[in-house]
């Protein structure tokens, strides 16, 4: 929205300038010369500047898009790996093997009537 606020008055002023300056003038660059109006020259310079800015923006976005494509490819690979892990985790485990996490799930109970003493603060 801010771009429009800046660009529209600039383009309006450029078009008014071009319409007001229609007298042909001699133009030259190095050894080349031609006749053109100042308004057409201003429009040409604005068009070239616009294209140069668009090219610079495209070059800057090229690296961003390449990184985004690599990240999307990595996400697809990780999703595939996750699906494979889920598939292997959902297969039933044989009765002769005990999963490692089940061996760690041993509970410890205190004898009835014994109270667990809080740690003393005198550790020195």
Image (spheres, grey):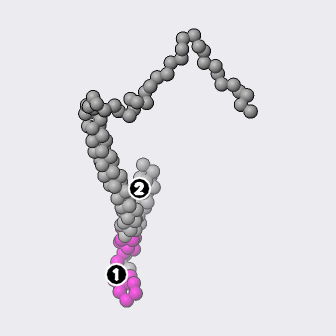
> In the image, is residue 81 above or below residue 16?
above
- Callout 2: SS: helix
What residue is rendered at 54% in x and 14% in y? 111
In-image side of 11 versus 117 (left or right) = left
Res 18 seen here: no
Which residue does the numbered mark 1 point to in the structure image?
35
Is residue 43 shown in magenta? yes
Quadrant containing the C terminus is top right
- Locate residue 53, reporting x and y percent: 40, 65
Which residue does the numbered mark 2 point to in the structure image?
8
Is residue 70 shown in magenta? no
Magenta residues span: 26-47
- Locate residue 1, reporting x and y percent: 42, 49
> In the image, is residue 36 above or below residue 71?
below
Residue furthest to the front: 96
Q: Nearer the viewer, residue 23 or 78?
A: 78
Residues at marks 1 and 2, CA–CA distance in whole angstroms: 29 Å
- Callout 1: SS: strand
Q: Nearer the viewer, residue 90 or 25?
A: 90
Q: Nearer the viewer, residue 34 or 4?
A: 4
> In the image, is residue 67 above or below residue 35?
above
Q: Nearer the viewer, residue 10 or 61?
A: 61
What residue is rendered at 30% in x and 49% in y? 77
In-image side of 27 versus 95 (left or right) = right
Q: Which mark is residue 46?
A: none
């Amino acid at each position: 929205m801010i771009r429009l606020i800046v660009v529209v008055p600039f383009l309006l002023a450029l078009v008014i300038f071009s319409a007001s300056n229609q007298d042909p003038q001699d133009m030259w660059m190095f050894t080349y010369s031609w006749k053109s109006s100042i308004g057409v020259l201003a429009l040409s310079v604005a068009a070239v500047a616009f294209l140069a800015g668009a090219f610079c923006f495209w070059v800057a976005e090229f690296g961003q898009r390449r990184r985004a494509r690599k990240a999307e490819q990595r996400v697809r690979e990780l999703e595939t790996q996750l699906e494979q892990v889920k598939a292997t985790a959902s297969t039933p485990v044989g009765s002769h093997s005990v999963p490692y996490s089940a061996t760690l799930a041993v509970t410890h109970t205190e004898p009835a009537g014994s109270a667990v003493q809080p740690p003393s603060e005198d550790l020195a």
